[in-house]
Amino acid sequence: MTFPIRIGVGLQPQHAEYSTIRDAVVRSEEMGVDVAFNWDHFFPLSGDPNGKHFECWTMLGSWAEVTERIEIGPLVTCNSYRNPELLADMARTVDHASNGRLILGLGAGWFEKDYDEYGYEFGTKGSRLADLREALPRIEQRMARLNPPPKRDIPILIGGGGEKKTLRYTAEFADIWHGFGQADVIAHKNRVLDQHCNDIGRDPATIERSCGAKPTEPGSGDALVEAGATLITVGFDGRSSYDLAPLEDWLAWRDEKNAP
């Protein structure tokens, strides 16, 4: 399977009024961005740690109604914050609200302040990964039982680079893998993921590969594609008022790469 090169935008829901975030996702769609992501945290990850911040899934429901074409999703949902069956139902509902445009991004969780402030047990990295492994088939099973079912088979994205567990879970359950780091790191992790796929008898080419990039570095795209990525997400937060102008160069680069 060959995936086209796609450009995502990461609209980090921090340091901005909600109206500004909503306008940014609408502008992203108008510009021709392929996917708009937010993230699943309760406090900013950079800047003022107690600055403005908004919740992930209620935001995605709003995005579903104010857009028409762009895919939407969390990069990524923290598995610890919601019962897996509830999360499946939430995802199905947003998928219907968006007419089949949701990507369900999932991760094990890591930001301790979220856990402490909202009363979740932080546990250990190992226990959070074990919880994610338990949740993945439960989400799949609940999706199959929902009435009405999702508009489509909702793509599952797993974020993270743990080679023994996270990438193994990706091989078993996911449609998209999102990694973090420079091109050499992405290339190495992709080789590990390929091996996990081979070990379980899955074609590695059935998993789309995703990573992040800086707004002002469209020149890094070639190296990321060489490393195996085809979905490249450029991040912005409210401190820039979501100045999306750098996306123009990224979109031009995408169009050139995808040209016949």
Image (tube, rainbow, N blue to C red):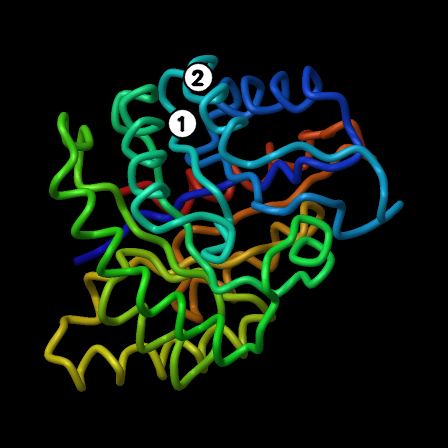
Measured as percent of width and height from the top left, residue 121 is found at 59, 64
The residue tagged 1 is 70
- Residue at point 18% right, 28% down? 151
Measured as percent of width and height from the top left, residue 114 is found at 68, 53
Q: Relative to 211, say whether 17 is above or below.
A: above
**What amino acid is at disc 1?**
Ile
In the drawing, does residue 174 fall left or right of residue 109? left
Measured as percent of width and height from the top left, residue 189 is found at 43, 78
In the drawing, does residue 232 fall left or right of residue 110? left
Quadrant assignment for the C terminus? top left
Q: Which secondary structure lies at badge 1?
A: loop
The residue tagged 2 is 67
- Residue 252 shows in this picture: no
Separation of disc 2 and disc 1 at Cα?
Answer: 7 Å
- Residue at point 24% right, 63% down? 173
**What amino acid is at disc 2?**
Thr
In the drawing, does residue 237 fall left or right of residue 252? right
Out of 110 and 242, give the one closest to the viewer: 110
> Would you identify the image quadrant in which residue 153 lies?
top left
> Would you identify the image quadrant in which residue 150 lies?
top left
Out of 37 and 40, give the one closest to the viewer: 40
- Residue at point 25% right, 41% down? 154
> Would you identify the image quadrant in which residue 1 lies?
bottom left
Out of 260 and 11, give the one closest to the viewer: 11
Q: Relative to 99, say whether 166 is above or below.
A: below
Could you classify mark 1 by the number of other residues whose Cα lies within 10 Å: few (under 14), some (14-19), or many (20 or more)?
Answer: many
Q: Which secondary structure lies at badge 2?
A: loop
Determine contact: label 2, label 1, CB under 8 Å. Answer: yes
Could you classify mark 2 by the number of other residues whose Cα lies within 10 Å: few (under 14), some (14-19), or many (20 or more)?
Answer: some
